[in-house]
Image (spheres, grey):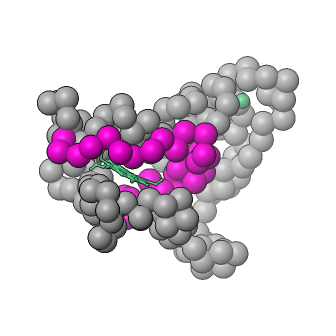
Amino acid sequence: MISQDVIHSLFLPALRIKQDVLPGRYTQLWFQADQVGEYLPECAEFCGTDHSQMGGRLVVMEPAAYQQWLNGAATDETLAGRGARLFRSYGCSGCHEGDSSVRAPQLAGVYGRTVPLSDGGTTIADESYIRDSILMPKKQVVAGFQPLMPSFQGRIGEEDLIALIAYIQSLGRSDEVSR
Ligand code: HEC
Ligand SMILES: [Cu+2]
């Protein structure tokens, strides 16, 4: 989860779960819903004048019903599929694929890998690293590459970022990290 503006907090009282949703940083929440039904989330962090208007719904379904819902979904494009399209439209593929004039790392298998950095350190390529690589490419430069990637800060919204990350994840993950 991530916020495009201020801190919110996803609260599902019926499930006894609550997690802050921050701008600029992904947070996660795991839960097991064991009863089919609809649950209403609330925002548990005062976030502005429309705080009380923050709505949504969590629908818990039996696996078969979920499959049926998936099959009937209005769009057949997956998140990763949309990311693949954006990867071309934002011009990422121009550097990261095929015979580009700029030497850029291949992104297949990068997700989950330990990346060596030009400052001599290393980092794990998780969702946050990939997000930062897109918005602040100069913050952590991959060892052996020039800092030639432009920043996409302000040009790519959170939803497109999530799709791009899903696409990069779909290119395969490294088995180096065991969870
Ligand atoms: C002008 C060429 C260029 C463009 C356009 C570009 N990149 Fe990059 N990218 C690079 C280079 C060079 C590096 C390695 C240096 C660095 O880390 O900044 C890199 C690094 C990365 C990394 C880290 C890779 C690793 O092995 O750790 C990711 C992820 C990434 N780019 C994603 C993207 C995405 C997504 C886009 C499009 C929104 C994009 N790039 C657009 C040149 C580019
Ligand atoms: Cu809120």
Q: Is residue 158 left or right of residue 168?
A: right
Q: Quadrant of the C terminus?
A: top left
**Residue in view at x 53 percent, y 31 percent:** 24
Foreground pick, 58 / 117? 117
> Is residue 169 at least partly visible in the picture?
yes
Q: Position of residue 149 (x, y in %)?
A: 39, 46
Horizontal and vertical percent for residue 7? 63, 25
Is residue 159 covered in magenta? yes
**132 to the left or right of 19:** left
Residue at 66 percent across and 55 percent down: it is: 59
The magenta stretch spans which residues? 143-170
Q: Residue furthest top?
A: 46
Asked if residue 164 is positioned above or below residue 138 in the image, the reply reads: below
**Does 163 lie within the magenta span?**
yes
Q: Quadrant of the N terminus?
A: top right
The quarter holding residue 115 reads: top left
Quarter of the image for residue 114 reads top left
Q: Is any part of residue 34 visible from this angle?
A: no
Q: In this image, 141 relative to 67: left or right?
A: left
Is 133 on the left or on the right of 73, as rendered?
left
Instruction: Decide which of 168, 39 is in the foreground and name it.
Output: 168
